[in-house]
Every structure is written in C-alpha cells, then in structure tokens.
Amino acid sequence: MMGYSFFGHGNRSAYFCYMQKPTPIGVFDSGYGGLTVLKEIINRLPQYDYLYLGDNARAPYGNRSFETVYHYTLQCVKWFFEQGCSLVILACNTASAKALRTIQQNDLPEIAPGKRVLGVIRPTAEIIGSFSETNSVGVLATNGTVLSESYPMETAKFFPDLRVYQEACPMWVPLIEANEHTGHGADYFVKKNLHNIFEKGEDIDVILLACTHYPLLKDKIEEYLPVGVKLITQGEIVASSLADYLQRHPEIESRCSKNGRRDFYTTDSTEDFDNHTATFYGASITSKHMDLGQ
Ligand code: DGL
C-alpha cells in the first residue's frame, strides 16, 4: 500500500473529504498511452504529485465490449480512490468513451460523491473545431471510441456545423505496444487508415489522434499526411483543460498534493513497463506492481 494512502475507501470520502490530507492526481490508461498525456500535464503543472496506473495486463481495451471496458476502468478508479486520490484523469479515449459517463453518473454518487473523474474526450471536443478552416475534422481512434460515437456527439455541442469523420485503426495500438511502430510493418496500416479517412472526407484539414497511444506514430503519420493537413495530439489540450479545471475548482485543487512526486503502477510486469516507458514518457521510470487480485 502506498505511503500517501489515508482513510482508505472512497465510500467514506463524502464524510472525510474536508479532513483529507492532499493526495496525488490519479492518471489512468489501459497501458502506456496515458504517459503521453501525463508528460504534457507535468510540463504544464509540474508542482502536483501524480499517481499513474497502466492496466497493461488487460490492454489493449480498444476492441473490448462496453461492459468489459467499464468493469476494468471502474476497478482501477476504485484503486485510485483507495490510494486517497480525489481527482482521477482517464487518460484513455476508450475508457473515456465507454466508462466515464456511467462512472460519473451512476458510481461516483454512490461510492465517492466528493471525488472527481475526468476524461480526455470533452476537453478535446471543446477545441478541435477551432483548428479547422474547412470545418471538417478526421478522428483516428480505437474501434471502441469510434463505435461509441463520442466524438461526433461531443463536438456537436461546441461546433454544430463541424463535419466529423472517423476511422478505427485497430492495428495501431498492438503495433505500438509491441514496439513495432517505427518498423516497416507500421507503414502499411498507417497508409491504409489515412487513405480510408480521406476517402470519407476529402476536405479534412485536421486529423485528431484520438487515442493516447497514437502520438508514438506521429512521425510516420506525418510522412503520409497530405500537405496542409494539421495533426493534433491531445496531451497539451488535456493539460491546459486540467489547469483551467483546477483553477475553477479550488475545492478539488486544495486536495491535490504538491511535492512534484510521481509514482507509476502497472497491472503487468514492472520490467516490461519500465523498458517501454522511455518512448512514451521521455524519461526512465521505476514502476511498481498493482495486483488485480482475481
Ligand atoms: N490509449 C487508449 C486510448 O486512448 C487505448 C488503447 C487501447 O486500446 O487499450 O484510446
């Protein structure tokens, strides 16, 4: 159990929230991808403590059912609450698309009414339309995110006239997780999925990488992107939205500890995690194991 764990379970947090000593901001992903978001969050908000959990043992989430992604994500969110976190960021589009709303609306009021869980889709949807001059955006994401229709639905709230074309890229995460994203095999799938999305929307001038793993393929995607098309990653968008959120919610901000501490947990092998993370995070990491206990 971690050093900064305090009273224990989230279901007591409503009563104890005013007595709680500050705790880290939780950052969750199905695996390594959330590290690309955490890196940008730390650039923007270095003063806070962060606790990262990658559910590598059950990744990728992208092709899994709604129920499975929800069940896995909720289990991990509860773990963050047990460590004392008051704020958890789902730095995973698939989890944000398939689990966030249910957790916010059904679970939080029951298990931890004073705590907050935020995702990456809403902050991206709030801004993505402003990058496009043709009013046409292409969203590259996992199957789960595409099928959820979360991006078309969320962007419509902020940019009602924006045309949103989606393309699922189910091979990209496995390529990245297998460290094959710089190899020649990745070219085939990058070209194929880009070709497909531009067939759907010829006037697309903004491509959004709506999966936190995809920034690892950025160089390769840029090679095959038509001239003039902007490539948008989410890390900075999410970081800036979090900064804004913390400013607008002092009751949550005051419960986030500020010692510049970072802790990393994985549900799978810590050795594998540590070997991969330089690529995603840009620095070496010594992770600890989180036991799913099943
Ligand atoms: N990184 C996750 C996302 O942003 C998905 C990766 C996975 O399929 O597990 O959607």
Image: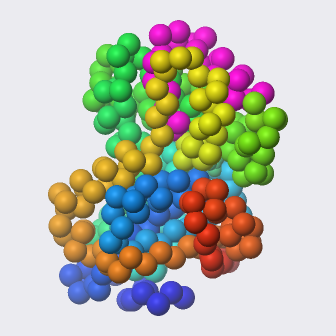
Report which quarter residue 44 is drawn in: bottom left
Residue shown at the point (28%, 57%) measured from the top left: 243
114 magenta-colored: no
Image: magenta residue range = 188-210
Q: Residue 65 appears at what percent x and percent y?
A: 64, 45
Residue 205 versus residue 93 in the image, above or below: above
Residue shown at the point (31%, 27%) measured from the top left: 130
Report which quarter residue 171 is drawn in: top right
Give the quadrant of the N terminus. Answer: bottom right
- Residue 6 visible, this orientation: yes
Q: Residue 277 appears at what percent x and percent y?
A: 64, 63
Residue 269 versus residue 153 in the image, above or below: below
Tell me: 58 left or right of 75: right
- Residue 98 visible, this orientation: no
Q: Residue 248 appears at what percent x and percent y?
A: 17, 57
Tell me: 244 left or right of 121: left
